[in-house]
Amino acid sequence: LKVGDKPTLLVFNKIDAYTFIEKEEDDLTPVLPENLSLEDLKKTWMAKMEGNAMFISALNKTHFDELKDEMYSRIKQLHEIRYPYNNFLY
C-alpha cells in the first residue's frame, strides 16, 4: 500500500473531560493510567509521534487554532508539491 510515508497528525479530542488522580510522592505503587497528568500524556505521545500529535477540546475550542494552523501548513506543503504553479493558498 505504501502508506508508511504519508504525513500523519494524531489528534486527541476531549481534553476538557480528562481527569487524573495525582499520586503522593511517597506512594511506591506503580503508576497507573489514571495517575498520568495531561502534560505527561502529551510528552509521551509527542515523543512517540515525533511531534505529530495534538491535544484539543472541540467543545471548548482549546488548541483549536493551533490545529487549524498546523493543518493549513501541512496542506500548503502538499499543495506546493502537487501544484507548483498554483499559489492560491499562499
Image: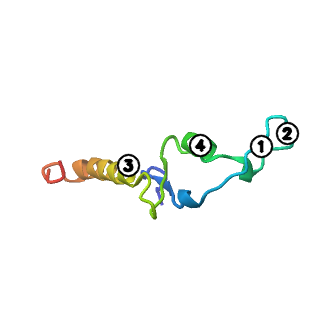
Amino acid at pointer 1: Lys
Q: Element under label 4?
A: helix
Q: How is the image coloured?
A: rainbow
Identified at 14% across, 54% down, the residue is 88
Q: Residues within 10 Å of mark 4 (few under 14, many from 20)?
A: few
Decide which of 52, 83 is in the foreground and name it: 52
Amino acid at pointer 4: Glu
Left or right: residue 20 versus residue 62 is right
Nearer to us: label 4 or label 1: 1
Question: Which of the 4 quarters of the picture holds residue 43?
Answer: top right
Asked whether disc 1 touches disc 2, contact meaning CB atoms under 8 Å apart, the reply is: yes
Q: CA distance from mark 1 to mark 2?
A: 7 Å
Nearer to us: label 1 or label 3: 1
Identified at 65% across, 46% down, the residue is 37
Q: Going from the N terminus, do you reach mark 4 or mark 3 first?
A: 4
Q: Residues within 10 Å of mark 1 (few under 14, many from 20)?
A: some
Q: Element under label 3?
A: helix
Left or right: residue 76 versus residue 35 is left
Q: CA distance from mark 4 to mark 2?
A: 20 Å
Question: Which residue in the protein does label 2 denote?
Answer: 27
Q: Element under label 2?
A: loop
Decide which of 69, 60 is in the foreground and name it: 60
Q: Going from the N terminus, do you reach mark 3 or mark 2 first?
A: 2
- Disc sitting over residue 39 in the figure: 4
- Disc sitting over residue 74 in the figure: none
Question: Which residue in the protein does label 1 denote?
Answer: 23
Left or right: residue 84 versus residue 43 is left
- Disc sitting over residue 66 in the figure: 3
Amino acid at pointer 3: Glu
